[in-house]
Image (spheres, rainbow, N blue to C red):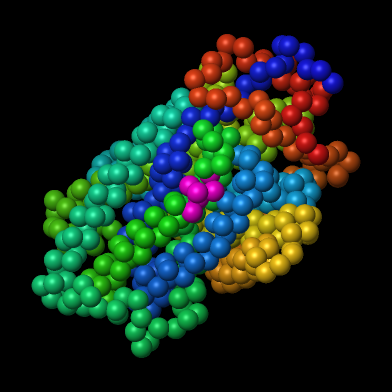
Amino acid sequence: MTRPALMANPTTLKRSLGLWAIVGLGLGYMTPMTVFDTFGYVSEESGGVVPLAYAFALVVMLFTAISYGRMTRVYPSAGSAYTYASETVHPNFGWIVGWTALLDYLLLPLVNALLVRQYMESFFPEVSGWVWVIAYVAVITLLNLWSITSTSRVNATLLIFQVVLIGVFIVLAWAALAQGAGNGTPFSLEPFWHANVQVMAVVSAATIVCFSFIGFDAITMYTEEAKDASIVPKAIVLALLFGGLIFFTAGWFAQSLFPTDAGFEGTALPEIAYSVGGMIFQIFFVSAAVAAAVASSLASHASVSRMIYVMGRNGTGPISRFFSYVHPKYRTPAIAVIFVGIVSLGAAVADLDFIFTLINFGALIAFTIVNVTVILHFAVRNKQVKGFSQIFRNIVLPVIGIALTVLLWVNLNIDAMIYGLIWLAVGVVVLLTITRFFTRNLRMSFAEDEVISEGSEGEDALRPEDREAFDEQGGGVRG
């Protein structure tokens, strides 16, 4: 069917992100400073081998990162695991995967707002936490509404600030170790391995630190805004490796300085900073932690709004159309961005420990499913199992990824399992509602031929009612 001229250019996301901008957004999402926030807990859980826990988690994530990179080439959509599961299995199954992943993606902006509230309350206890949350969430939401390019630039500045401060910490820690602090030498292997290391303790600790790596997968949600979609797989691996290197190195020096449980309560970051650099360095280091939270907020807010946008675009009815709205001037998923901001306001009353128990549940399920989709797409659907190379790439690698992510998932704490399963059950109920007990089909829409390039203007964008008519005529709809 020939498309009406009026419907030739529907409002879509703007292709404006280069390779390093996407890598930066992934690193900002991962929040390098989080290694210090969780250090005390991870050190106690792992038995004093924080770097080993990060190394194990990195290996697990690397297999999954390869799978994400391969699937984003096949399905260059902002929907990530949701899209891959929808296309390789069924849209209903994909919707459940997307819903489960939202437990991770939707809560991280809230976590960052909560952390900033706590930082500000410690400096200004007389000011209500509501004030900081509302002001902070408003700024983050407006930046994400404005444009993904501005979000990327602010994120890059904040990311550089925290990486520089981590570098200063390493230099100060090296000097302290050389003078006899902690293990007494920067060359000790004790932070990585010692006689009392227990494998299952390391695995348990890895389930905690895998939270730190969440962000490399979120890069796939910028696929429709990358200048060239083919750079996304490379950005995924680069963000993961750079993030892993930072976590491992910072964790190594922190563990060298505090080889045994130092009795940290809550975040260990201020005490670690004070121990190596005194009050002045502590102020700068806490400032870097705030910058890290802001950078993570910008990146996580941007990515989850893209997932909500894609899920709305692929749904049916007025609610789906509502969430799939793209601002005609700024080319951002405006309604989805505002919705994430509203959820983030919960930081004024939320409990941090409770939120943390939920995040990894959804992430590890999504990681597992992405590895499964590689097998289904390449080995089962396309029969690419001829010879050792194809079998290794299309079966062996993703199976290893599945095994490792499941290993972490079954070692989550009981609260994460209980509340995660409750969230999953709610998702099933919602799916039954929007499909009218599977009597109405979900759809998959990529509209790749309609994604505009950087510099395009928005005056000719479709009005919502025109976009609805366009969809009804079959434009941009798959499956």
User: Which of the pair 394/49 is nearer the observer?
Assistant: 394
Residues 287 and 67: in front is 67
For the point 61% across and 46% down, the residue is 72
* Farthest residue, direction bottom: 195
**Residue 283 colored in magenta in the image:** no
For this orientation, the residue located farthest to the right is 439
Quadrant of the image containing the N terminus:
top right
* Left or right: 127, with 431 as reference point: left
Residue pictured at 38% horizontal, 38% vertical: 155
* Residue 236 belongs to the span the image colors magenta: yes
The C terminus lies in quadrant: top right
Q: Would residue 468 be visible to someone looking at this image?
A: yes
Of helix, strand and loop, which mostly describes the magenta segment?
helix
Examine the rendering and report whether any part of residue 299 can be seen. no
Would you place residue 161 above or below residue 323 in this image?
Answer: below
Task: Answer with the quarter of the image where residue 225 lies.
Answer: top right
Kindly give the residue lying farthest to the front in the view shown. Answer: 387
Q: Is residue 233 left or right of residue 273?
A: right
Quarter of image, res 334: top right
Q: Where residue 178 sits in the image (x, y, percent)?
A: 13, 72
Expressed as whole percent of the image width and height from the top left, the position of residue 462 reads 66, 16
Q: Tell me the quarter of the picture where residue 129 sits.
A: top left
Q: Nearer the viewer, residue 205 or 415?
A: 205
Q: Position of residue 80 (x, y in %)?
A: 62, 46
Residue at the location (74% across, 64% down)? 386
- The segment highlighted magenta reads 232-237
Q: Say how many tags the image has.
A: 0
Please determine whether, in this image, residue 17 is positioned above or below residue 432. above
Q: Residue furthest left?
A: 179
Q: At 65% from the left edge and 65% from the top edge, which residue is drawn?
A: 389
Residue 61 location, x and y as percent?
52, 61
